[in-house]
């Protein structure tokens, strides 16, 4: 399949509207760099499904022909470049094809590259002498002037069963719409999740609607009462979806819903409990957690800070817990604020909004020096 060839990804850059010429050159260099570092067969090794479905996060990014996706590829390659001389980076690169590990390792690469760019030296697992089945933190950082050492454990908040079902359903829909040609676009809303039987019927309707939309160059709708409302058209005529989307209070270009009730802060505290055992007691330590939606779903920033800090204060060997999230879009600009002794920041990077809440454990036995603490605040 052409999609799983690096050369195809380079050629496909010309099909992406909205990328400036310099951005296309940057993306081309990034793809060539990833081919060299990850291997000629990486994309094929990352595809474990027959027939092909883009489940691996990197493949899903490449399957998205929005300009932001290629900016994300360029940024990922830049992060790896920053870490090139870091000890044991090869161990991380060797498992990047594993879709079950990629979100963890992508977060590890991102946060490590920020800190190395600030002058710290990084060593990936193993980060300590291997003996007696001793637990190994993901990352060891050293301040080269003072020799101060800090260990970092990285983790991701695993999606709930409900979220996984929604992701799998959306993946099936996107595969039906985009296939390997990416000549269609869509806008729609889930009212509720379909049963397997209903989904099979919906996918069949989508196949027929896509064929009509492409051949007749018009907007074609797919509707399943109480479940889904969607419209498709040819990618060259994406503007035809604007009126349809506006009438339904949709932004266009994607699927939204269904709404979910979550217990994010409870699950975050459980994750802190489980992951803090990786960190040694003799040094200051940091725990970084990917929590993509917590600031939207858990009742606001103040509530998140208040509820999660209860789980931070319990563990004396953890000085900082950093909750990190990222999404496409710029509904609000960059900002930063204090939440009692904690710090929240939002930054805009190439069309992505990134959130970081740095929770400080005032009860920790060992703390980062002021200079190292400042590096973390600048980085997150």
Image: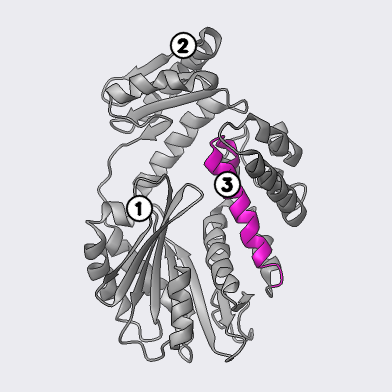
Question: How far apart are labels 3 and 1 at the CA level?
Answer: 22 Å
Sequence-wise first label, 3 or 2: 3
Q: Quadrant of residue 307?
A: bottom left
- x%, y% of residue 73? 61, 48
- Determine if residue 194 is in view: no
Quarter holding the C terminus is: bottom left
**Which residue is more in the foreground, 120 or 287?**
120
Q: Kindly report which numbered mark, 2 or 1, lies closer to the viewer in this rendering.
A: 2
Label disc, if present, on residue 71 of the rendered structure: 3
Q: Disc 3 versus disc 2: distance between alpha carbons?
A: 30 Å
Q: Which numbered disc, 3 or 2, marks the residue closer to the eye?
A: 3
Q: Which residue is mark 2?
A: 218
Badge 1 local density, few (<14 within 10 Å), some, or many (20+)? some
Is residue 188 part of the magenta span, yes or no?
Answer: no
* Magenta span main SS: helix
Q: Residue at x 37, y 24 (%)?
A: 198
Which residue lies at the image location 59% right of the left edge and 38% below the top edge?
19
Give the magenta part as a residue range.
61-85
> Foreground residue, 252 or 222?
252
Disc 3 to disc 2: CB gap under 8 Å: no
Q: Which residue is mark 1?
A: 293
Question: Secondary structure beneath disc 3?
Answer: helix
Quarter of the image for the N terminus: give it: top right
Residue 21 vs residue 251, the one in the foreground = 21
Question: Helix, strand or loop at disc 1?
Answer: loop
Q: Looking at the image, is mark 2 or mark 1 earlier in the sequence?
A: 2
* Residue occupying image coordinates x 57% and y 56%: 102
| Outermost residue to the top | 216
Would residue 244 be seen by someone viewing this image from the given angle?
A: yes
């Amino acid at each position: 399949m052409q999609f799983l060839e690096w050369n195809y990804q380079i050629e496909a850059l010309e099909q992406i509207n909205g990328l400036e010429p310099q951005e296309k050159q940057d993306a081309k260099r990034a793809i060539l760099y990833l081919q060299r570092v990850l291997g000629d067969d990486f994309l094929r090794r990352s595809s474990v499904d027959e027939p092909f479905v883009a489940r691996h996060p990197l493949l899903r990014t490449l399957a998205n022909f929005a300009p932001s996706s290629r900016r994300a590829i360029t940024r990922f390659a830049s992060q790896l470049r920053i870490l090139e001389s870091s000890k044991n980076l090869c161990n991380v690169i060797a498992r990047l094809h594993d879709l079950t590990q990629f979100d963890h390792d992508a977060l590890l690469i991102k946060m490590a590259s920020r800190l190395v760019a600030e002058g710290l030296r990084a060593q990936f697992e193993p980060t300590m002498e291997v003996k007696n089945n001793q637990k190994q933190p993901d990352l060891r950082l050293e301040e080269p002037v003072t020799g101060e050492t800090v260990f970092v454990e990285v983790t991701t908040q695993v999606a709930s069963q409900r979220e996984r079902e929604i992701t799998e359903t959306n993946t099936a829909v996107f595969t039906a719409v985009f296939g390997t040609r990416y000549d269609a676009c869509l806008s729609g809303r889930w009212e509720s999740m379909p049963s397997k039987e209903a989904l099979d019927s919906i996918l069949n309707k989508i196949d027929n609607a896509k064929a009509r939309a492409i051949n007749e160059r018009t907007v074609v709708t797919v509707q399943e009462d109480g479940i889904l409302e969607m419209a498709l058209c040819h990618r060259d005529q994406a503007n035809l979806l604007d009126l349809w989307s506006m009438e339904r209070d949709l932004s266009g270009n994607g699927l939204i819903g269904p709404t979910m009730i979550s217990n994010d802060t409870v699950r975050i505290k459980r994750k802190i409990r489980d992951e803090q055992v990786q960190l040694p007691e003799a040094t200051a330590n940091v725990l970084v957690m990917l929590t993509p939606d917590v600031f939207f779903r858990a009742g606001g920033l103040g509530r998140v800070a208040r509820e999660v800090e209860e789980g931070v204060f319990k563990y004396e060997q953890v000085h900082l817990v950093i909750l990190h999230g990222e999404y496409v879009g710029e509904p609000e600009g960059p900002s930063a604020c204090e939440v009692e002794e904690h710090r929240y920041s939002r930054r805009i990077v190439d069309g992505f909004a990134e959130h970081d809440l740095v929770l400080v454990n005032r009860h920790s036995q060992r703390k980062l020096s002021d200079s190292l603490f400042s590096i973390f605040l600048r980085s997150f």
